[in-house]
Amino acid sequence: MGCGSGMVGPRSVEENKTGRKVFCVKFQREMPGLDESPFDNELGQRIFANVSKEAWKLWMEQMKMIMNEYRLNLGTKESQEFLMKQMEDYFFGEGSAFPPNFVPPRTKS
């Protein structure tokens, strides 16, 4: 007997609790949406209306990289505004910028 989940093939996309679907701006197809708005502002409403749960998960990974590479202190208004701008660019603009001199981590072979 092997270990693991026993699943064969790709994992299914995680469904949301509400069954709500959105046309995702990242994947350009209809997908399960977020269960609630991530923020109580205009950007949060745009994300809720246009970003899939799967795209949000990808943003969370991107956000961690940005926070670490730029050494952001989210206790400051400047860092919060910078991160919000990166989020808006990631979903609705040209994409968030990688920090200067950023080298992606090597993948293990």
Image (cartoon, grey):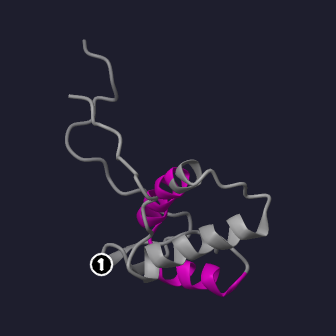
Say whether residue 100 is left or right of residue 9.
right
Horizontal and vertical percent for residue 84? 62, 73
Residue 95, compared with residue 66, is above or below; it is below
Asked whether 47 or 13 is in front, the reply is 47
Q: In this view, does 31 lie to the left or right of 49?
A: left
Q: Residue at x 48, y 52 (%)?
A: 61
Q: Residue 20, image x and y in percent?
A: 49, 76
Q: Is residue 34 left or right of residue 54?
A: right
Q: Which of 43 and 28 is in front in this view?
A: 43
Q: Residue at x 69, y 64 (%)?
A: 79
Specify the principal SS of the magenta part.
helix
| Res 71 visible | yes
- Indicate yes or no whether the magenta region holds residue 52: yes
Using the image, determine if residue 99 lies above or below residue 84: above
Q: What element carries label 1?
A: strand
| x then y, percent, for residue 94 | 38, 79
Tell whether position 2 is magenta. Answer: no
In what quadrant of the picture does the C terminus appear? Answer: top left
Which quarter of the image is occupied by the N terminus? Answer: top left
Residue occupying image coordinates x 44% and y 83%: 92
- Please state the horizontal and vertical placement of residue 26, each as a whole percent of the image: 36, 74
Q: How crowded is mark 1: few (under 14 residues within 10 Å), some or many (20 or more)?
A: few
**34 relative to 90 in the view: left or right:** right
What residue is at 31 percent from the left and 18 percent from the top? Answer: 3
- Residue under label 1: 29
Residues rendered magenta in the picture: 41-65
Could you tell me the amino acid type at mark 1? Answer: Arg
- Tell which residue pokes out farthest to the top in this image: 1
